[in-house]
Amino acid sequence: MLRAVLVDDEPLARQRLLTLLEETGQAVEVVGEAADGKSAVPLIHELRPDVVFLDVQMPLLSGFDVLDLLANPKPYIVFVTAYDEYALRAFEVHALDYLTKPVRRERLQKSLQRIAQFIDLRQPDHGLEALQRARQTMPLQRIALQAGRRLKVVPLTDVHFVEAEDKLVFVHLADSRRLTDFTLKDLERRLDPSCFARIHRAYIINMAFVRELVSDADTGYQVVLANGAILPVARRRIQALRELLGG
């Protein structure tokens, strides 16, 4: 039985896809639905479906944004879109499959057959990997954080700093810290360099929350953040930090 999650901000589109999946006669169980990208991320994380039928154009988080925030191992992704330009982008990066609206039953059956072949052969979706690589140059706007057994999606403007600790990476908010599946190296590459700065092998800070840069004869340079955190600055990163601070 293929376990699926449907993500679309249009209720009628989700209902149509659900009906078509039933009409195909294929062994598919829809285990969850999401009406927007923000709720889709924790839902997919919790349910661990085999495949996600993912609408591309949604408010706040697009289908591509959702893909950025999913932890490994990722499900197979079938993009669903009413816009040919998005279908073309998905095709160009060799996505597992894409469906254009209105979805046709015959086309959906072919997609399900392709998914089944991938699963039977335990074949990874190299197109998904290609799409992720293509998006590495695009700054993240939000980040998915672990909150118990679920994920919480927060805007990066709420992040004070990121910390690496014993091979784990924690994101610090105003009054809490949450685990993320991103590595510090990944975040350094994906965060907007005009807003975030790597100041140490273990820390990336949000420049908006820097309140003071202080030096001490014994401890060297440190930054003081709005939430009270005091973090060390590596010697080789001091000049770059000064420039970002306008000094």
Image: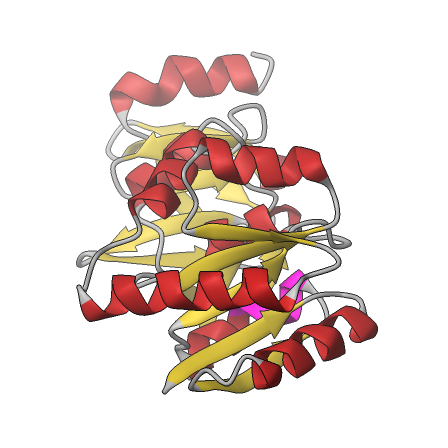
Circle count: 0
- Residue 63 magenta: no
Q: Position of residue 202 (x, y in %)?
A: 28, 43
Viewer-side residue, 43 vs 178: 43
Q: Position of residue 30 (x, y in %)?
A: 54, 85
Q: Main secondary structure of the magenta part?
A: helix
> Residue drawn 27% across and 21% down?
235
Please, is residue 237 above or below residue 185 in the view?
A: above
Viewer-side residue, 236 vs 141: 141
Viewer-side residue, 174 vs 232: 174
Q: Quadrant of the rendered structure where residue 104 is?
A: bottom right
Specify the segment rendered in magenta.
Answer: 37-41
Q: Quadrant of the rendered structure where residue 117 is?
A: bottom left
Q: Position of residue 153 (x, y in %)?
A: 58, 63
Viewer-side residue, 245 vs 20: 20
- Taking the image as drawn, is residue 169 in sight? yes
Q: Position of residue 38 (x, y in %)?
A: 65, 64
Image quarter of the N terminus: bottom left
Image quarter of the C terminus: top right
- Residue 38 magenta: yes
Please, is residue 5 above or below residue 74 in the view?
A: below
- Taking the image as drawn, is residue 174 in sight? no
> Residue drawn 43% across and 30% down?
134
> Residue drawn 50% across and 68% down?
109
Left or right: 225 in relation to 167 = right
